[in-house]
Each structure stands twice: as structure tokens, then as C-alpha cells.
Amino acid sequence: MLKCFTDLYGIQSYLINGVRSKKGVIRPSQLMPLTLLEIEAYHQQNKNLQRIKELKCTPQLNSVHFDVHKSAIGIFVAEIMYKSIKEENHADLAMFTFLHSSIQLLDLQVDKLANYPVFFLLQLSRYLGFQPKGTFDDSTNGFDFREGIFESYSSRNPFQLSPDLSQQLAYLLNSNASNFQEMTIQYEDRLQLLNCIIEYYQTHVDGFYEINSHKILAEVLS
């Protein structure tokens, strides 16, 4: 079975036969996580499992599945998508466009990938409906990662990022595909940001339990 996020139907599940057969039309290499596909399928209403007529990989990804750093990030992104986007048969073209371009961005980025996971999480939160609120300034210099809001920093709040970390988070929140990598964030700070934003997701997404792929990121992006 193949589960995809599509432009016309949202999350869809597809039945695929003969993938491991030598005569199979669809190859296992076409079904790797984050592969961008053009699918022709027989869609039937009120069916949870659709049948694929034809598929092809387009645009072709060149490095996500072969570069060790990008592969680790790709596994992380795929797990985040799987655990946070759950409503089937619900089209969301804006989210589809974002995910489609984000995967291509990861594939094309030559270096400076360390900020990508946090950048992706923050940008995806916009489409999931719980984008962090407020802005960072001298009076709202602490980000509460439980409530998702910039507020006055208090060292007594255990769910608040320090002013330095809050400023770095604000930068990535307001970044785009062309400049997210420009801020230099120390490894320990980046790891703390990643863990806090994952906890932020756990607070806002039902069933978003502990994930494992970010532990690989901690090693690969050190």
C-alpha cells in the first residue's frame, strides 16, 4: 500500500500490486519516502483504498535519497508529515504546494542544511493551523513553546526559550527558501530549538507521540 498527499484529494491510500515482481510496472525505487509522483489512478468515492493505473517520478529527485545528510532529514520530514497530516480525502492545495516545493528545496540545496529541520517545522505549522503568534522584540523576547506565543521573558517559566533562542526561532519563522540557512546557529542551540518545536507539535497535534528520526538528525547534523 502507498500513502500519498495529493493535490486533488489530500491524503490517499493506493493499492499497488507486483512491486517486487520482475514484470511489475511500478518499481520499489519509485516508492521511497518523499518521492514526487505524477499518478494516474482510478478514484472511487467512499473507497479508502484506490487503485493506481500509472505513475512516474516527476520532477526527479537527485540527492535526497543518496546523500546521507539529506536522507536523514528526509526521513525526519516524512515522519513529521505522517504524524501531523491525518485528515484523508481533504484537499489542501496550499499545503500541497508548500510540501512539494520544500522537498525540492531539500533536494537542490547544496550545503548549509543544518537549519532546514527547524525551518520546515515552523513553516509547516502555518498550514496546520497553529503558527506561532506574535513577534520578537525587546518586550516580547521569550517564546513559550507550549502556548506558541512570544511574550516577556521570565526565567521562572520552564516552557520558555531564552531571549537568544527566541530570536533565532523568530528569524527562522520569518525566513524563506532563499535565506533560512544564513543564520549561524550553534549545534546545542539548534538541537534545543528542534526538541522544543517537536514538543510544540505534540501539544497541538492529536496523537503526535514521540518521534525517533530527530535522534538521527542530532548525530548527522552535529
Image: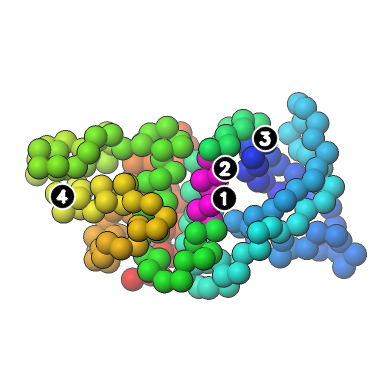
Question: Dot 3: few (<14), some (14–19), or many (≥20) neighbours within 10 Å?
Answer: some
Q: CA distance from mark 2 to mark 4?
A: 34 Å
Query: How far separated are the C-alphas under marks 1 and 4?
Result: 33 Å
Q: Where in the figure is residue 91, as x and y percent of width and height?
A: 62, 32
Which numbered disc flags the more N-terminal residue, 1 or 4?
Answer: 1
Q: Earlier in the sequence, mark 2 or mark 4?
A: 2
Measure the C-alpha gap from mark 3 to mark 4.
Answer: 41 Å
Residue indicated by mark 1: 100
The residue stretch that appears in magenta:
95-103
Q: Specify few, some or many for label 1: CA neighbours under 10 Å numbering under 14, 14-19, or 20 or more.
A: some
Of labels 1 and 3, the one closer to you: 1
SS assignment at label 4:
loop
Three-letter amino acid code at disc 2?
Answer: Phe
At horizontal 68% and vertical 39% (from top left) the residue drawn is 12
Q: Is residue 60 magenta?
A: no
Image coordinates for residue 121, horizontal then vertical, percent: 40, 48
Q: Which residue is mark 3?
A: 9
- 2 vs 4, front mark: 2
